Image: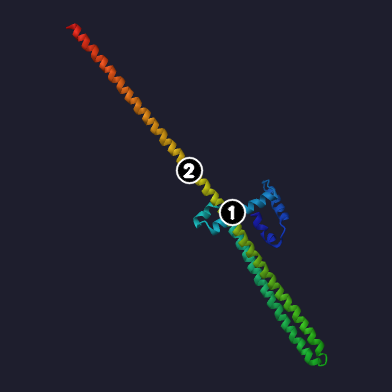
Amino acid sequence: MIRAELDPTFMEKKRNKVLWEVISNKMKEKGYNRSAEQCKCKWKNLFTRYKGCETIEPEAMRQQFPFYNELQAIFTSRMQRMLRAEAEGAATGLKKKAVKLSSDDEDKNEEIIEGEKGTGSRKKIKKGKAIGGTSSSGNSISLKESLEDFTKQQIQMEMQWREVFEARENERMMKEMEWRQTMKQLENDRILMERRWREREEQRRVREEARAEKRDALITALLNKLRREDM
């Protein structure tokens, strides 16, 4: 919210260290002890998450990013301000052009009336046209360059984010592969241990059966001996 309030100022200034200090102070006023660098780092992380939801993740994934709507409002408001500034610049250029044309007509009338002084007036008219045209075209070029710089910055940030995302995705895939191999090894070890346990259980059962057979044989032999003695 604090960053959104200062977004127009961020767009006007190139060095934003003082603005991050202002944000840090406002955070402290609200009970959050955060440095300017921490605030700046947090904003970069939020912007990265926002671009991820905007360009790659599906619409349903946006619900997992709780600040998506706030950042969407910030960038929408920023684009509206730029479009409004562009429209105002174009309107100002048209107004200057109308004033210049009116001035040209007056100068032409003066040129006809004065007659011999026409040479000096024509030089003055040409100079006025050059200054007016340069000012209007300069504003248009400046606005166009600003838009181009903004677009280039957005593209560059998106490319950097994609590189970071791809690196993290590759790292995640490597970790997942290692995890799968570890789980597979653990499963093989479990199967081997279970097999050994079953073998030991089978051997124990065989020994128990042999011991029981010997015991039964001894009891039978003893009973037969006692019967023969009684007879």
Q: Position of residue 53 (x, y in %)?
A: 54, 56
Asked which quadrant contains residue 155, the reply is bottom right
Give residue 180's position: percent from left, percent from top: 47, 44
Which residue is farthest top? 230
Indicate which disc residue 181 carries. Answer: 2
Kind of residue sitting beneath label 2? Gln
Q: Secondary structure at mark 1?
A: helix
Residue neighbourhood size for the residue with mark 2, other residues' Cα within 10 Å, grouped as few (<14), some (14–19), many (≥20)? few
Look at 53% across and 48% down and name the residue there. 172
Q: Residue at x 52, y 47 (%)?
A: 174
What element does badge 2 sit on? helix
Q: Whole-percent x and y of residue 184? A: 45, 41
For the residues labelled 2 and 1, say whether their Cβ atoms are less than 8 Å apart.
no
**Closest to the observer, 51 or 191:** 191
Please name the residue shown 35% across and 26% down the image.
Answer: 203
Amino acid type at image mark 1: Val
Label 1, on which residue? 164
Is 204 situated left or right of 75 in this image? Answer: left
Lateral position of residue 132 relative to residue 1, left or right: right
Location of the N terminus (image quadrant): bottom right
Whether residue 40 is situated above or below residue 123 in the rendered picture: above
Q: Is residue 32 above or below residue 150?
A: above
Vertical arrangement, residue 208 with respect to residue 4, above or below: above
Q: Whole-percent x and y of residue 9?
A: 70, 60
The answer to which of marks 2 and 1 sits earlier in the sequence is: 1
